[in-house]
């Protein structure tokens, strides 16, 4: 495995490569493309943290845990609360900030604050020719006219190997609480979550587990200063009375633990089967789950994100047919991944766009993805 200790070493390794390079960070997101392994785990360290400017710069291989610890000391946070995939995918390793940006990872708060891409101020990366590219900076400004940082975010290493990221961070929260309704069916839960998100009470999380212990559980998160949280919880419970009976839970540690589980899709941990991640209009979510015939379902983002656990080898996209959204197979055997990718190729227009970008940033086809 190639493990460069500096950006210059990484660029030289890419320039010297004669075959595909399989890029990885902490190795937490399952099977990777074939090719000579190149890891950014040797590029570590927070190079800048300016609490007053709400800015943090770190090398790509820096563990997310290290970054969160440093931010916590300043009562700050990564507001997009990146998911930890290890429990869901059965992987080991250490999540890195470069991997988070490369995959554009986010958690339950995405519907309120956006994903990793939306907090990215700039980055440095090495393209497929071994050229070091810097884009953006410590402010949201790009004189080239092209927002390469947001383009590379989510590209999973296909356009370049990220070496450093600059992120906008936000202040921490004093406290948090949950509003919980039990026994709602999927359609009623989505209506309740949509109603909550349409209020001015700043709901920062909305999830529904139809298979929770004790029956279906719908949970809404409220965060902020203690007096504000108490007021908003009470007012929201009254506003949502037509959608069920709502209980307020104020144990901060329990609330934090539950949302870590929601973020990491804890209900699926240890369960056998394929895992699909489906983005959809909330208004279509309950019907889509009914059509899927999955072993288990879990709703996040107020119904805009659905996690489905299906039988191994089940072609979920064929069952769902046409809908306003996208389904991604996240966990399956290599054989199932290959089979379903063949059955469901990308639309021609998207293939052409992807091909054009890769020819620009990686004309030699060195970066496997």
Image: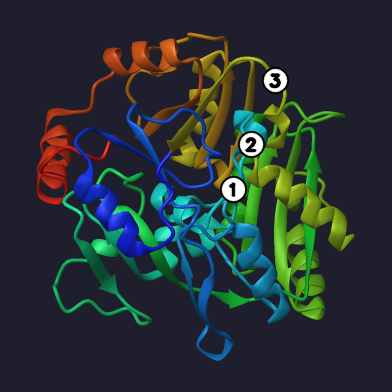
Name the side, left or right, on which 353 lies relative to 240.
Answer: left
- The alpha-carbon separation of the residues under discs 3 and 2 comes to 17 Å
Nearer the viewer's eye, disc 2 or disc 1?
2
Which residue sits at x=47%, y=60%?
43
Crowding around mark 1 (Cα neighbors within 10 Å: few <14, some 14 to 19, many 20+) is: some
**Farthest residue toward the bottom?**
52
Q: Nearer the viewer, residue 159 or 255?
A: 159
Is residue 242 in sight in this rendering? no
Crowding around mark 2 (Cα neighbors within 10 Å: few <14, some 14 to 19, many 20+) is: some
Is there a contact, CB below 8 Å, between mark 2 and mark 1?
A: no
Question: Which residue position is annotated with label 3?
Answer: 271
Is there a contact, CB below 8 Å, between mark 3 and mark 2?
A: no
- The alpha-carbon separation of the residues under discs 1 and 3 comes to 18 Å
Image coloring type: rainbow
The disc at residue 92 is 2
Circle 2 sits in a helix, a strand or a loop, which is it? loop
Q: Is residue 287 positioned above or below 29 on the image? A: above
Q: Quadrant of residue 22?
A: top left
Q: Mark 1 or 3 closer to N-term?
A: 1
Nearer the viewer's eye, disc 3 or disc 2?
2
Circle 1 sits in a helix, a strand or a loop, which is it? loop
Q: Mark 2 or 1 closer to N-term?
A: 1
Residue 36 picture location, percent across and down: 34, 33
Can you say which quadrant of the picture contains the N terminus? top left
Residue 257 picture location, percent across and down: 80, 51
Which residue sits at x=43%, y=37%?
280
Residue 51 picture location, percent across and down: 58, 86
Can you say which quadrant of the picture contains the C terminus? top left
Question: Which residue position is annotated with label 1?
Answer: 83
Q: Nearer the viewer, residue 90 or 44?
A: 44
């Amino acid at each position: 495995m190639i493990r460069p200790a500096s950006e210059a070493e990484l660029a030289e390794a890419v320039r010297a490569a004669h075959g595909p390079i399989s890029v990885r960070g902490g190795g937490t997101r399952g099977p990777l493309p074939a090719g000579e392994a190149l890891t950014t785990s040797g590029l570590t360290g927070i190079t800048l943290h300016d609490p007053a400017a709400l800015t943090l710069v770190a090398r790509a291989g820096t563990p997310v845990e290290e970054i969160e610890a440093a931010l916590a000391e300043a009562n700050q946070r990564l507001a997009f609360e990146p998911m930890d995939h290890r429990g869901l995918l059965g992987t080991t390793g250490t999540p890195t900030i470069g991997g988070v940006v490369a995959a554009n990872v986010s958690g339950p708060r995405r519907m309120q604050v956006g994903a990793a891409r939306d907090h990215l101020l700039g980055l440095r990366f090495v393209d497929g020719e071994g050229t070091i590219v810097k884009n953006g900076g410590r402010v949201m400004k790009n004189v080239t006219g092209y927002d390469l940082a947001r383009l590379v975010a989510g590209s999973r290493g296909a356009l370049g190997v990220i070496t450093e990221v600059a992120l906008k961070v936000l202040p921490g929260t004093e406290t948090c609480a949950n509003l919980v309704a039990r026994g709602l069916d999927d359609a009623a839960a989505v209506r309740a979550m949509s109603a909550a998100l349409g209020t001015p009470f700043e709901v920062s999380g909305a999830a529904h587990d139809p298979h929770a212990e004790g029956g279906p559980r719908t949970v809404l998160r409220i965060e902020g200063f203690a007096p504000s949280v108490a007021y908003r919880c009470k007012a929201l419970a009254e506003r949502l009375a037509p959608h069920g009976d709502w209980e307020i839970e104020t144990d901060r540690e329990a609330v934090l633990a539950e949302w870590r589980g929601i973020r990491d899709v804890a209900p699926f941990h240890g369960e056998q089967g394929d895992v699909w991640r489906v983005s959809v209009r909330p208004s279509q979510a309950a019907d889509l789950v009914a059509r899927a015939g999955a072993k288990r379902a879990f709703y996040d983002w107020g119904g805009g994100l659905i996690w489905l656990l299906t039988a191994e080898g089940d072609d979920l996209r064929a069952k769902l047919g046409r809908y306003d959204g996208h389904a991604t197979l996240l966990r399956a055997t290599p054989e199932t991944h290959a089979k379903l990718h063949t059955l469901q190729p990308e639309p021609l227009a998207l293939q052409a766009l992807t091909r054009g970008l890769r020819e620009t940033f990686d004309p030699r086809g060195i970066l496997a993805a």
